[in-house]
Image (cartoon, rainbow, N blue to C red):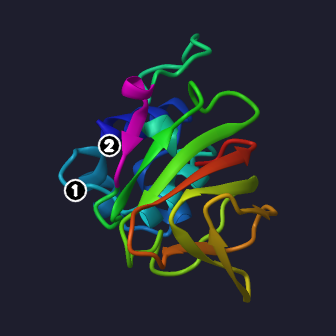
């Protein structure tokens, strides 16, 4: 499904698979395998493709823009990349508005990525449960439940669960890019 969405969006933009591969820093073979559903892309790969196609990552997981204004907890759109030990849930109806709100969870001792990554849009993260260590640029911050952090666009960051329970964070991103 993700691969088919990527292909559809690429074709809608009139972009060849080789051009997408080149601009996203991937091989054409990787793009082909992703689009055919042979492999599940990592979070890093999804970010690169989404950035190249100028769309939030959650676009690949949505059927269509929502006309709803309420998202029931049992109807949230979720995804968990193969290299990620946790899950992402879309709390806003979709990614077409001016702000995107997601829930991010991580298992104890795991991180959101192998290295700090950046994306378009400012981000405000609130720790709801657990303990987080956030590397933002050259700094490291310790956050507990109730603490929040604001990250300006383009600052590479990585979240690590340093507690013994699941880490749950709510994240608002403007404009939507995740």
Residue 85 marker: none
| Location of residue 7 in the rendering, given as x and y in whole percent from the top left corner | 38, 39
Outermost residue on the top side: it is 67
In-front residue for pair 124/10: 124
Residue for point 44% across, 28% down: 73
Q: Position of residue 139 (x, y in %)?
A: 74, 87
In this rendered view, identify the residue nearer to me: 38 or 169: 169
Q: Seen from this angle, which residue lies furthest bottom? A: 138
What residue is shown at x 47% (from left), y 68% (from top)?
A: 112
Q: Residues within 10 Å of mark 2 (few under 14, many from 20)?
A: many
Q: Indicate the quadrant where residue 110 lies.
A: bottom left
Lateral position of residue 174 relative to residue 22, left or right:
right
Residue 61 appears in the rendering: yes
Sequence-wise first label, 1 or 2: 2
Assign the N terminus to one quadrant of the image: top left
Mark 1–mark 2 distance (CA, rounded to whole Å): 9 Å
In the displayed orientation, state which residue is furthest to the left. Answer: 38
> Is 74 inside the magenta-drawn segment?
yes
At which x and y percent is residue 107? 36, 66
**Mark 1 Cα-neighbour bin, 10 Å: few <14, some 14–19, many ≥20:** some
Tag 2, which secondary structure?
Answer: helix
Residue 130 higher or lower than 59, as above or below: below
Magenta stretch bounds? 73-80
- Where residue 65 appears, as percent x and y from the top left, is 55, 19
Residue 22 lies in the magenta stretch: no
SS of the residue at dot 1?
loop
Q: Residue at x 46, y 66 (%)?
A: 44
Residue named by callout 2:
3
Provide the residue designation for mark 1: 39
Q: Nearer the viewer, residue 58 or 76?
A: 76
């Amino acid at each position: 499904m993700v691969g088919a969405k990527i292909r559809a969006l690429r074709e809608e933009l009139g972009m060849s698979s080789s051009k997408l591969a080149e601009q996203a820093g991937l091989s054409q073979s990787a793009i082909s395998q992703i689009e055919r559903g042979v492999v599940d892309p990592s979070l890093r790969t999804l970010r690169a493709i989404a950035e190249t196609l100028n769309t939030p990552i959650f676009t690949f997981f949505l059927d269509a823009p929502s006309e709803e204004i309420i998202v029931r907890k049992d109807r949230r759109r979720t995804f968990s990349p193969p290299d990620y030990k946790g899950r992402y849930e879309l709390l806003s109806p979709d990614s077409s508005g001016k702000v995107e709100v997601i829930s991010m969870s991580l298992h104890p001792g795991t991180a959101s990525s192998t290295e700090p990554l950046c994306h378009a849009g400012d981000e405000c993260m609130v720790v709801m449960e657990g303990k987080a260590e956030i590397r933002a640029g050259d700094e490291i911050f310790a956050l507990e439940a109730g603490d929040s952090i604001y990250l300006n666009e383009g600052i590479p960051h990585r979240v690590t669960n340093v507690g013994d329970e699941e880490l749950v964070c709510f994240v608002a991103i403007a404009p939507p890019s995740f």
